Amino acid sequence: MSHQGRWRLVQKAFEHLYSGPVVKLRPFYLPGFECTPDHAVFAAIGGGTVKKMKAGSLRLGDYLAVPLAKPSSDEPVDVEKILRDEPAPGYKYDVRLEIVHGRIRRTSERGLGVPAILHITPRVARLFGYYCAEGSLSRAANRPNSGSVWFSFGAHEESRIREVEKILGDVFGIRARRSRQKNRTAVIASSATLATVFRHFCGDSSATKRVPEFILRSGNKRVLKAFLTGYLNGDGYVTKSHGRFVLGSASVSQALTYGVAQILFSLDEIPRVYRSENDSEYEIEGRIVNRSDDHMVRLLVDHVSMTPQDVDWEASDARVIRRGGFILVPIREISRADYVGPVYNIEVEEDHSYTANFMAVSNCQNADISQRRKVEGIEVEPQDVVRMTVEQGCQGLAYTYNQPTIFIEFARDIGMLARKAGLINIFVSNGYDTPETVAEMPKFLDCVTVDFKGSGETNFVRKYINIPNAEPIFQTILDTRDTKKIHIEITDLIVPQVGDDLGAARKLSKWVYDNLGPDTPIHFLRFHPDYKMMEFPWTPVETLEKHCTVAKEEGLKYVYIGNVSGHRLENTYCPGCGAIAIKRYGFDITGWYLDKDNKCKKCGYKLAIFGRLEQTAKENRFYSVLYHR
């Protein structure tokens, strides 16, 4: 749900490493959440107007905003689509779905089946509520076409038992049977199709139970109330506390408890949501059994009545403010702590917001992360970076992922100290730099690899990089070449369908040959779908191989494939005899077949490689950058 009370599609979930302070905001009644101080949340200063503000700016007495769901149309459930999308059990014979008189079933199944289109009435909602509270599924291991839905009740709960039996018969056409064991009675609906429907919408175990999506999104308050009626009749309780009644429930499923709380918010009520931490094991009748934590939702009420057909209550007052489509909940506690580790975010379509434990927060878009001017992470001076690098036994520093020249002065200051300490400096760059930036590089930089996308083809860079053409990148490379102090390599991300033109790759390879020379390494990288380009597949390896062939035809001697661990074109081959000179697997060097002068041991050809294989090459070379003391 977005801050506008609308259910919106999540477009992307992502994480990144973070080191720094976090803020924990805990309101009355709700669990609260932790976030970075700069994360934008929807809040009201002193209960005033709701607006986006940084979490770190909030104080006690301010309010967090819980959005109220906006009315929406209730659409019927397409059961046929659900069944067709479900993987079919391992039947011995061919089994199909058939629809007769608006009811759908598998051909191997007895009975009339279930409605192909299920209209969500209060009675249907009530049955799903009963299932979330008391339901379970069963299937015979040796009979893949079997399946049953069980509803468990106390033997004395005759009115609830009859209610479930009647709904099963009237809505689904299923004549349920009963099974009695000691003081329990189970209502059993034998239908593999119905079991599939309940498993799809509600889960199949106590730990995976959840409120069906069509209930959560319903704009019909009668449907919402009916679901609660079924659920609370099965798993609810009423107690008295401090002169008032408490209507509540508990579950080991956090998703189910939060779903019930969301329904209460949609009914304009103020639930209390808690987590009770239990011992992981306890003894019962001489046996040690595992136990999960309980997730509880409670509603303080002045009056409550409960029947199988309805739960009615009169809620007690709560210290909240209702304003402009929000319930404003006062902040009860604010704490701060240092944190090192992953932080998470999601991007949501249109509204660019979502709820964190019911409270509205803004999502961080990729542009916000990559373009923001505030640097998150540990605060270090250039000398700290160099000291950490030396302490970890590294041979050098690679400035990568974020474009290193955005903060060229900081990179320069680090690099100059690193060079004095005997370390090498490498840039992984997009090449879109000013002459002033390039002028700083010879002071400290040993190597740069310039990343092209789609071979720098004009139509591709206009559409996907938002630049007129790649000419500024080529100019940067020429300026860097002219310093005569920096080794240059080229990488080219090959994007299938839109950035894999062999003509463009040939043009780029010829430019590299003509302007940088045949010894310049070029790497063709495999694209993988992520973030905004999920509609494209991984680059076929055959496509990368064709690009390598084109580059070799243009005269380049050192041509590689990247992001395909184990491929033969990860290796360096001797231009003289074609033998393997350096063997690689991913990041690892697994074979070195050069003499002390970097000549091929087979034919004596001197390769354009500087330096020797470090003795530490086989040691662990990966250290977290979130290390500082």
Image (cartoon, rainbow, N blue to C red):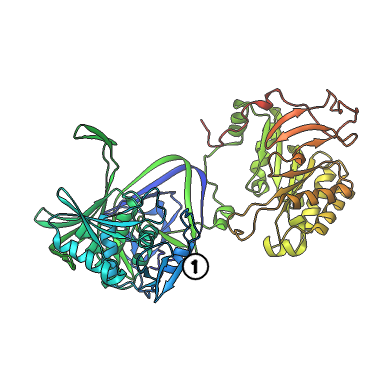
Residue at 23% over, 63% down? 230
The front one of 169 and 241 is: 169
Q: Position of residue 401 (x, y in %)?
A: 63, 46
The front one of 254 and 97 is: 97
Q: Position of residue 585 (x, y in %)?
A: 69, 35
617 relative position to 595: left or right: left
What amino acid does circle 1 point to? Glu
Q: Which residue is mark 1?
A: 350
The front one of 447 and 571 is: 571
Residue at 38% over, 60% down? 201
Q: Identify the residue at the far left of this view.
A: 243
Residue at 65% over, 29% down? 394
Task: Say above or below: 537 vs 567.
Answer: below
Q: Quadrant of the N terminus?
A: bottom left
Residue 316 visible here: no
Task: Say above or below: 377 vs 76.
Answer: above
Residue 12 visible here: yes
